[in-house]
Image (spheres, rainbow, N blue to C red):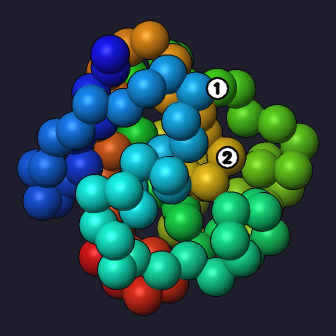
């Protein structure tokens, strides 16, 4: 089972393939909020994938359009609600969701 490492906390957890990054984050940090409930309509779950980016599901049109509207987006940006874990380990950096990390 692949592992997800969440930075800056360094928390590592095993995540079944097919799980969204948002689902995994919420399972490890139960009080974490996000505004749209995982529908890719707000951009508050913007994260940076620092390792394992190619293992994640591909960015679709809806996610790409939402990322275009998010401030601070870079080449390693994804929406945690849309990115699904593949078979490889992934490391992400969270700078802050709607309620903060």
Question: Viewer-proximal residue, 60 or 28?
Answer: 28
Residue contact at pointers 2 and 1, CB within 8 angstroms: yes
Q: Quadrant of the N terminus?
A: top left
Where on the picture, by quarter, is residue 67?
A: bottom right
Residue 38, numbered circle = none
Where on the picture, by quarter, is residue 37?
A: bottom right
Q: Quadrant of the C terminus?
A: bottom left
Q: Mark 2 — residue?
A: 82
Q: Secondary structure at mark 2?
A: loop
The residue at the point 71 percent across, 76 percent down is 36
Q: Mark 1 — residue?
A: 57
The residue at the point 43 percent across, 26 percent down is 16
Residue furthest out toward the right: 61
- x, y percentage for residue 24? 41, 48
Q: Secondary structure at mark 1?
A: loop
In the displayed structure, 83 sits above or below 51; it is below
């Amino acid at each position: 089972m692949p592992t997800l490492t969440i930075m800056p906390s360094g928390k590592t957890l095993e995540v079944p393939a097919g799980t969204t990054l948002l689902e995994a984050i919420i399972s490890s940090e139960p009080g974490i909020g996000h505004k749209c409930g995982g529908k890719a309509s707000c951009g508050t779950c913007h994260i940076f994938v620092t390792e394992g980016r190619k293992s994640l599901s591909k960015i679709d049109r809806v996610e790409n359009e939402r990322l275009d509207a998010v401030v601070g987006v870079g080449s390693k940006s994804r929406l945690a609600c849309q990115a699904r874990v593949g078979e490889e380990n992934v490391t992400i950096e969270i700078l802050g969701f709607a309620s903060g990390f």
